[in-house]
Image (tube, grey):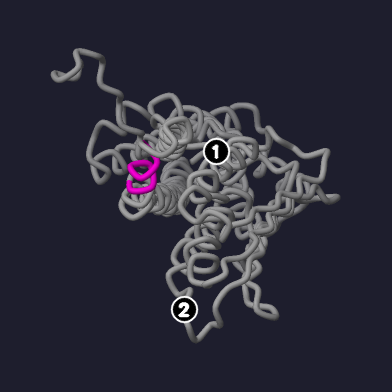
Amino acid sequence: MADPRTGTPASEPEPWLPDLCRLPRLVVMLSMAELIVIVLALAPDGSAWNLSRFVSSSAFALWLALAISVLLCVSRRQLSRLPPGVGGFIATATAAAIAAAVAAVTHSIDSITGLGLIPAGTGFGRFVGGTAAIAILAVSVVLRYLYVNDSWKAQVRANARAEVEALQARIKPHFLFNSMNTIAGLVRSDPAVAERAVLDLSDLFRAALGASKSDSSLAEEVELAERYLAIEQLRLGERLRVVWRKREPLPWKMPLPRLVLQPLVENAVLHGISRLPGGGEVEIELTQLSDHLLLRIRNPAPTPAEGRAGARHAQHSIGQRLRYAYGPTARMTAGWDGGYYLCELHVPTGVEAQSR
């Protein structure tokens, strides 16, 4: 179906049914099947279990789980077009039907050949019905677990997108007004500098808003911070001094969440340098260590009692997005030290960021 506003095909919504084609999801399903066999083997019901029965039961359960997984994988998009309640019922009913059919065939073959794969005294109806019931319970538990897990991850991704959109919107008001006032003051006195400032401002907003791009790189984050500082230096003049320490080699193409460096540099200027009558020096250091990238922003700042509470929102957001993208090994630390405010980002290298 085409989008009536653009005439382009509308993208199909993401299926809600968990994707059992993915190896980790398939492992969950197979593990559940094997766990059921282990529980049955350990159950104190008086039945005799030996190695041969355990192996044959495991093979039967794993093969059945694989067959159900493949069928649910193939029919995922069709089932996801239905409401979750209806689609979930059909998925479990399908699993029960497959289990009943496989159990019926297995019981018939065992009865004809006399292999003894099924315990003596287990009737056809008991074996088929019990297998179908266990399949319903197992598939229901696995699909519910994966559905809740996928919903949680989708919520985390939505929160991360909302955080970065809030940071993008945060650049617009005060920074735009301050920059335009600075440029207006330069138009007559120094047109060349004013023109360069307009270009820097344009590049900054183009990079920050990203033309719908969600990911960035170390090189792009540094360029974004440099554009911002160039404009702020026009406004603050000699009160703002910037020192970059780029300790090569650096992983310039390393993927990073968008807007992790510029907001911290902005905090250093707004809550530190601009509040001091004599200004100060912002030190930005980039170092590649053995297993992670270290980014340090250090600047003179008023004491904690005088402010910088406005920096907490950006820091909290950046810390959350880094942990979401790289896991618990990514961290951010910040605090005052002898009249200076120091913020450090520790981003693991060699770890693929999750898609955002």
x and y percent of residue 288 in the render? 80, 47
**Residue 152 vertical position relative to residue 231 in the rendered view, above or below:** below
Q: Does the magenta stretch include residue 215?
A: no
Q: Is residue 243 left or right of residue 143?
A: right
Q: In this view, does 89 lie to the left or right of 346?
A: left
**Point 63% across, 56% down: residue:** 241
The disc label shown at residue 31, or none: none
The answer, for residue 67, to whether it is visible in the render is yes
**Point 54% across, 48% down: residue:** 229
Front one among 40 and 328: 328
Q: Which residue lies furthest to the bottom in this view?
A: 305
**Residue 67 vertical position relative to residue 297 in the rendered view, above or below:** above
Amino acid type at image mark 2 = Gly
Front one among 76 and 202: 202
Residue receiving disc 2:
307
Disc 2 versus disc 1: nearer the observer: 2
Residue receiving disc 1:
65
> Which range is magenta?
181-187
